[in-house]
Image (cartoon, rainbow, N blue to C red):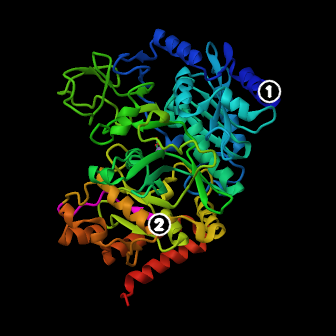
Amino acid sequence: MSHSVLRAWVNDVAALTRPQSVYWCDGSRSEIDNLTAQMVADGSLIRLDPIKHPGCFYARSHVNDVARVEDRTFICCSDPANAGPTNNWRHPGEMHALLEPILAGCMRGRTLYVIPYLMGPPKSPMAKVGIELTDSPYVVANMRIMTRMGQVALDELGEMGQFVKGLHSTCELDPAKRYISHFPEENLVISVNSNYGGNALLGKKCFALRLASVLAQKEGWLAEHMLIIGITDPNGRKTFIAGAFPSACGKTNLSMLVPPKADRDAGWKVETIGDDIAWLKFGPDGRLYAINPEAGFFGVAPGTSLATNPNAMLTCRANTIFTNVALRPDNTVWWEGMDGPPPAQALDWKGQPWTPASKTPAAHPNSRFTAPASQCPSISPDWEQPQGVPIHAILFGGRRTTTIPLVYEAFHWRHGTFVGASMTSEKTAAAEGKVGELRHDPMAMLPFCGYHMADYWRHWIHMGEQGGKMMPRVFHVNWFRKDSAGHWLWPGFGENMRVLKWMVARVHGEVDAVKTPVGLVPRAESLGLAEMGITGRAAEELLGVDREAWMAEADNRDRFFQRFGDKLPPEIFFESAALRFRLVTKPV
Ligand code: OXD
Ligand code: MN
């Protein structure tokens, strides 16, 4: 390895953290086999049944290390105005001073693994190299699934190439000393005292979203918390959609959607390109193209079943790491919501005996599977296209039981930016805060935007000015509407295909829409609501606009936008005023 900057950095980190040895990962099969064998021997992994789960391992985290920690996540840039009101800010000098004593000698007795990895398909002009230094073999094993790791990244890097630095140490997993710190001015992440995926697999949220969003603003592209799917219609035409949803709103399920049988028989197909992150850049033809920078899925296990997401179940059958799910006596895994009855007995995610009579869940609600994307039955033949796929539509969504219709289309890109900036979702039992309380989560990027959120919206508006008529259409969906008696108005899952098909038809100018004050909504017939038994009041509630409720919604949005003061782009202010105007004006 002859990259002198990389060598010097590894030496500096080793001098500070004092590992017993330094190991450069090449990403090979034999390397991972040795590493996992070592972890099985020391008890940190359990090998699952080789017939039912070939190449799979089971891991338990420390009980206090089960999720992302937004209050311990920092953007460290010189000027606090660049972090903005939605990020925790620290001066880089202050954060380095705080981290130095934590890092000093933290790898004593451990191996420092050097993980070269590539975010994006090999040979893609959009791909970027990262190097993660970690003392956690669990992180190495997960990074090998989530990224293209080893020699492929070093080849891409060459002798002089640029890379994003990531330094991770397990330390003592002390929550009081847990810092997930980003230094955008140094292209550096330092993460200590957590081994949880979102905090420790530094290619994912830390690089591909927080640091990449800063790079994207500078370089004129977008780094987004979005799934990417390709929809093939009966004529063989492909339409690509990128969609942003807050965590725990079904992104992985939508990215692997199985259309209802009648659609499949008619020739419709949904293919997966990514389930969590999209990098979008203008192509030579002026259209926006997207790549999935990741190579695996880090999916939430509970609720995943052959009924809700057969493609995810088939993806994680082999070569997968399961973390914090339950372990059955026959060395297979289980979680709440899996098909079939619960096991008579199991070990829960803490390693304690569990039976269906137990009062606590067997799997942690945020337990995960780390599985190779290439194993997904619905993976698109285009998922590793170096130039990405052309995006025809962008989708925003949240979990809202009231007010927001099943689907509406923005009038234009600037309105779509406002729609994305206005995204809110109701908190679920799995997240902090009261169930049902609204959380603003613009573009689903609240925890992931590495710079000032108002500048990020400005960047979206600039992108639209640059792309002009070539920009994708923007839609908002809400699968979670309930009626006044609290019953779901929409069945979701495969039936979401009706909404996707409407979008495809809109993109290609093949169906009309009804203009409402909030956007363009489908006619009930365009979705076939009657044949689903959704008629009368239910259909009206699902697609209608309650002006009073929307006025309260506009008030709520404006209270949120006020947090951004005079940094708020005037276009957002204008779109908010225009919405209010349309809400009080009778249609002509
Ligand atoms: C994730 C998240 O794990 O958004 O993808 O939290
Ligand atoms: Mn996510």
Which of 322/179 is in front? 322
- In the displayed structure, does residue 445 sit left or right of residue 531? right
Q: Residue at x 74, y 25 (%)?
A: 10
Q: Residue at x 58, y 59 (%)?
A: 453
- In the displayed structure, does residue 373 sit left or right of residue 386? left
Point out residue 420 in the picture as x, y percentages from the top left corner. Answer: 49, 63
Q: Is mark 1 within 8 Å of ligand 1?
A: no
Which of 9/293 is in front? 293
Which of 2/75 is in front? 2
Mark 2 or mark 1, whichever is nearer to me = 2
Point out residue 101 in the picture as x, y percentages from the top left corner. Answer: 67, 27
Q: Residue at x 35, y 43 (%)?
A: 430
Disc number for residue 8 = 1
For label 2, count other residues whose C-alpha is less than 10 Å away and answer few (under 14), some (14-19) or many (20+).
some
Residue farthest to the front, as pictured: 235
Say whether residue 33 is magenta. Answer: no
- Residue receiving disc 2: 507
Element type at mark 2: helix
The alpha-carbon separation of the residues under discs 2 and 1 comes to 51 Å
Element type at mark 1: helix
Highlighted magenta segment, given as a residue range: 475-485
Q: Main secondary structure of the magenta part?
A: loop
Q: Determine which quarter of the picture holds residue 112.
A: top right
Q: Amino acid at mark 2?
A: Val
Q: Is mark 2 within 8 Å of ligand 2?
A: no
Q: Amino acid at mark 1?
A: Ala
Point out residue 191 in the picture as x, y percentages from the top left corner. Answer: 60, 34
Say whether residue 480 is magenta. Answer: yes
